[in-house]
Image: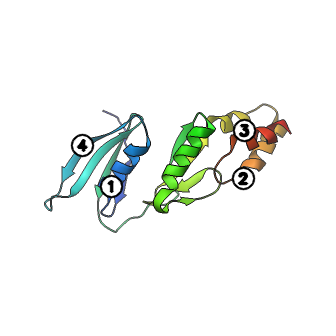
């Protein structure tokens, strides 16, 4: 059992959210569903890429904010593009610097590993150019980062 597990509060659509998230990530599954007295999902657990998440249909009392986001390391532009497209579908919104909100209001960071590599380069001038390029982006574009990196 995982020692620390994110717990996500939904108004009434936790089951829809679980189904949505497992449809996007390849190594994912529903682990458990507990129904309330009304026969609808009350709490549940699902996995994304081996990470457990608990959910609750807790009512309209709390909403997601950008103070918490799910950070996804992407190995390619194709992976960034695919996740960005799926997570912004049906009412999701783009934000800056690789951040987005899905249709449930949950914030995600869809970040290519290449960004961290370039930002961490020992040449601070190159890293600075990458940072400036990234700050102008919504979805991160690796080719534009490489152009900035190379000068």
Residue 82 quadrant: top right
- Specify which label sits upstream in the sequence, 2 or 1: 1
Work out whether 148 lies above or below 87: above
All told, the count of numbered labels is 4
Which image quadrant is residue 114 in? top right
Q: Which mark is residue 135?
A: 2
Residue at figure coordinates x 33%, y 55% from the top left: 16
Q: Is residue 147 left or right of residue 141?
A: right
Q: Which residue is label 3 attached to?
A: 119
Q: Quadrant of the C terminus?
A: top right
Work out how far the residue at label 1 is from the one at label 4, CA to CA, in angstroms.
14 Å
CB under 8 Å between discs 3 and 1:
no
Marks 2 and 4, Cα distance to the nearest angstrom? 40 Å
Measured along the vertical axis of the image, is residue 79 above or below residue 138?
above
Mark 3 to mark 4 CA distance (whole Å): 40 Å
Local secondary structure at mark 2: helix
Front residue of 34/84: it is 84
The residue indicated by pointer 4 is 32
Question: Which of the marked residues, 3 or 2, is nearer the chain's N terminus?
Answer: 3
Residue 69 visible within the image = no
Q: Find residue 16 and name its label.
A: 1
First in sequence, mark 1 or 4: give its number. 1
In the rendered image, residue 97, in percent from the top left (x then y), is placed at 65, 51
């Amino acid at each position: 059992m995982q020692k620390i597990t994110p717990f996500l509060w939904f108004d009434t659509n936790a089951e829809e959210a679980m189904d949505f998230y497992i449809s996007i990530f390849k190594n994912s599954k529903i682990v458990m569903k507990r129904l309330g007295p009304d026969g609808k999902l009350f709490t549940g657990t699902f996995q994304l890429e081996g990470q457990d998440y608990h959910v609750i249909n807790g009512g309209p009392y709390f909403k997601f904010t950008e103070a918490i986001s799910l950070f996804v390391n992407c190995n390619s532009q194709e992976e960034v593009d695919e996740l960005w497209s799926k997570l912004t579908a049906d009412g999701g919104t783009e934000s800056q610097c690789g951040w987005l909100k899905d249709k449930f209001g949950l914030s995600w960071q869809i970040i290519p590993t290449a960004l961290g590599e370039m930002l961490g380069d020992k040449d601070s001038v190159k890293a600075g150019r990458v940072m400036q390029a990234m700050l102008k982006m919504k979805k991160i574009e690796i080719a534009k980062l490489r152009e900035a990196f190379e000068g």
